[in-house]
Image (cartoon, helix red, strand yellow):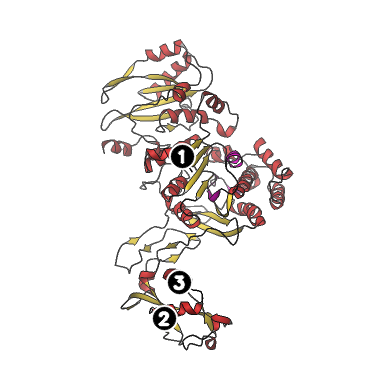
Amino acid sequence: MKNALYYGDNLEILRRKIGAETVDLCYIDPPFNSKRNYNQIYNNVGGEDRAQAQAFIDTWVWDERAIAGYDEIISNADGRFRPQLVELIKGLHAVLGEGSLLAYLISISLRITEIYRVLKSKGSFYLHCDPTASHYLKLLVDSVFCSQGGNFQNEIIWRRTGSHNSAKRYGPIHDVIFFYVKTARDFTWVRNYRPYLRGYVSGFFNKKDKNGIYRSQTLTGSGTRNGESGAPWRGYDVTAKGRHWAFPGTLAEELGIDELPSQREKLDFLYEEGYIAPAEVDGLPEYRQYLHHNKGTMLQDIWSYQPYTNGCLEGIGDAIDEDIKWLEKRGRSERLGYDTQKPEGLLTRIIAASSNEGETVLDAYCGCGTTTAVAQKLKRRWIGVDITYQSISLVLRRLEHTFDAAVLETITIDGIPRDMKSAAALANKQDDRLRKEFEKWAVLTYTNNRAVINEKKGADSGIDGTAYFKTGKTDNAKIIFQVKSGNVNRADIATLIGDMTREKASMAVFITLAEPTRKMKAEAKASGHFRHESMGRSYDKISIVTVKDIIERGIRLEIPMSLEVLAAAKRAVSSEQMDLLSA
């Protein structure tokens, strides 16, 4: 079965495209602008910096879509929603009022309901958020999962950055990840370990015999118990000491003795294999835990940058200096330039713990594709969904770059325009969330995902994308793109010539849904040619490309690019890029 990448609203896709109980693991990291002042969100107070809050406002605003979602939940006409969720949303409406925060919570409620439906009975759900609204989100997920036999497993704290200088409060440096399972007692779980903290090995594994370095651990717990746990064994009367037999948490797994049917047989095995020695203090036996049998410490619910050892004594072997370290703005080759990108190590840990090879992983807000890339590496089937074509473009480019072009043949891509009718439908969508999506699709498709989309709204608003192409070993030049979905005429080309001059671009491409006029073509030709010396050929300074050319003839930009979206999304050409050219 192929992997699937869906372009569109994830609620519609979850409901129409993904069947019930088909997903083994779902991770989502929905957008939420934590830069806004919390009190302004809670009280619906305006006045904050509009540029800073734009991403939040664009996505979460009390509008017709939010009202429709609220009415759908409250009316619950088809019985889709749990009564607990309905009552919760009614209560939140009374407390929060009709504003951006409630709009956000309604949107997430609709989608969590569908995520529960598509999860298999042994499935798991991870919700990545920040402390701004995590307390509300937990109530939402509780009302959906726990009301139907699911269970809340953990609140995971992940240190997402180094430090923040914050006025009159502690620096906010962590994210929250909620871990839920669909069935409380029967779900996929693969125990994960991390290396010991530096200093732990030398401090505790301080004994040695012919079998290696070890530490002593008790085989008993406090208090007496009846039955096998309290029965004497090989002359040791554990009850007389006020204790009972109890194995360390991972002992049986480490030594592969889980299948032994009784505790006595497990004790006999340890004794015969030389893992048990008399205690030095209270006369009860102890277990010799050898370092070479040890996997480290079972993962806890705080995931943070820590100085770890590689399992050897200090001074022997290398140290490991990071545990899912955050993505720094500089110096990390993994970074793609995507604002909310998460490190692959984070998703590796989640996917490895809650799924097996061949099982299906869903990310309904797949962004730059970290979940899909890690699932591919770990041999899972995956489903990615995103409402922006820029994200879809990044996912495809990332997979192609990480693996090879053949990986694209293993993906079913849904929602991307494949004919003129669907292209026109995208251009004419009225959904505010999808404004500029047609332009993004046209530019990125024509450039094979090598252009950078212009997100600015100002003097250069007529430019929809920018790319840089090689003109020599250490030189490059700029090409700009403009997309039009309505009527076009000669004046559009004249305006583009002015934009090209202002932006100091060497070439420009005009992409149009409508057929260009004869005068437009003549105006473009009159702009002249750009001589590409290293390619040994000339290009029109202004090219006119139709959407029909892109869809039906497969026309693509053929000039060698020097700026890849994968490595530099949303970033202008820099000296670092020039270094790349000469490499």
**If you read the primary sequence from the N terminus, does the residue marked by circle 1 or circle 3 appear first?**
3
Q: Quadrant of residue 104?
A: top right
Specify the amino acid type for callout 3.
Ile
Residue 25 lies within the magenta run = yes
Answer few, some or many: residues within 10 Å of disc 3's Cα (few below 14, many 20 plus, some between 14 and 19). some
Mark number displayed over residue 478: none
* Residue 261 appears in view: yes
Specify the amino acid type for callout 1.
Ile
Query: Is label 2 in a helix, a strand or a loop?
Result: helix
Q: Residue at x 41, y 38 (%)?
A: 397
Q: Residue at x 58, y 50 (%)?
A: 119
Which residue in the protein does label 3 denote?
Answer: 257
Instruction: Calculate the distance from the C-alpha at mark 2 to the C-alpha at mark 1.
Output: 54 Å
Which residue in the protein does label 1 denote?
Answer: 411
What is the x, y in percent for residue 22?
Answer: 56, 48
272 displayed left or right of 418:
left
432 displayed left or right of 294:
right
Which residue in the protein does label 2 denote?
Answer: 271
Answer few, some or many: residues within 10 Å of disc 1's Cα (few below 14, many 20 plus, some between 14 and 19). some
Residue 214 lies within the magenta run = no
